[in-house]
Amino acid sequence: MLFPRYLLLVLMIMVTGCDDLYPSADDKREPVDPNTIGSQPGQIAPDFDLTDTENNMVNMFTELNSASGIVLYFTMWCPVCDQHMSHMRTQVIPNYPNVKFFIIDFVSATVEESRTAQENNFYTDLTVLVNNIPQNVLSLYEATMGTTVVIENAGSHGIVRMNEDYKDSVKLTTTLDALP
C-alpha cells in the first residue's frame, strides 16, 4: 500500500509545480519596439533569400510586394507537420488568395533532398523553400518544427503579425482576416 501513496504524492507535487492549470491564449511576451527588426509580433520582419525546390531564388520582400501578407510554416516532414500542412492546405489557403504561403524545409541538406521530401509527401502544389544556405531563416524567426509566421505587407517592409507554433487554424485565420 506504500507505492500508491508515493505515486499520489509524486502526482501532487507535479501538479502543484504547474503555473496555471487553465492557461489562456493571451500572448504574454513583452511589448516590442515596432521600429526594430525582429521575429516578434509588431516588429519589422527580417528579409531573407531562400531557394525553392525548383532552384528559384525567393526573396521575402519581393514576394511580399505582390501580396497582402506571407505565411511561413517551418516543417520537418514529420506526421505532425503533415497534419498541420494538410489542414492549412484544405482549410486555410483557399480562403486567402491574396496571401502567399511558403513551407520552409529546415531539415533537408540540399534542394534535391527537399524536393524529394516534397514529392514523397505529396506537397508539390505548395511552394517549399530550402533553409540550407548560410542565412538561417530558422534563427531569424526563432522558429522550430511547426512554427507559423504571418508577415503583413506594410509598404516598404513587412511587419510580423504572428509567430507561434501551429495549434489549429483559429489564431492563423484571425490574424489573416486582420490583414489589409
Image (tube, helix red, strand yellow):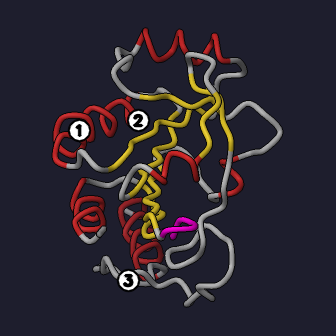
Q: Closer to us: mark 1 or mark 3?
A: 1
Percent position (x, y) of residue 89?
Answer: 25, 35
Which residue is drawn at the image coordinates 46% and 72% (left, top)? 14
User: Callout 2: helix, strand or loop?
Assistant: helix
Percent position (x, y) of residue 50?
Answer: 66, 36
Q: Is residue 26 above or below residue 78?
A: below
Q: Is residue 133 above or below residue 15?
A: above
Residue under circle 2? 81
Residue under circle 1? 87
The Cα atoms of the two marked residues, 3 and 2, are separated by 27 Å
Q: Closer to us: mark 1 or mark 2?
A: 1
Which residue is drawn at the image coordinates 83% and 39% (left, top)? 134
Which residue is drawn at the image coordinates 58% and 85% (left, top)? 34
Percent position (x, y) of residue 99?
Answer: 33, 50
Which residue is drawn at the image coordinates 21% and 61% (left, top)? 170
Q: Which mark is residue 18?
A: none
| Quadrant in the picture for the C terminus | bottom left
28 or 16: nearer the eye? 28
Residue 110 falls in which quadrant of the image?
top right
Residue 105 is a magenta residue:
no
Residue 156 is a magenta residue:
yes
Q: Is residue 66 above or below residue 157?
A: above
User: Callout 1: helix, strand or loop?
Assistant: helix
Percent position (x, y) of residue 62?
Answer: 56, 47
In screen coordinates, is 160 left or right of 71?
A: right
Residue 7 falls in which quadrant of the image?
bottom left
The magenta stretch is: 155-160
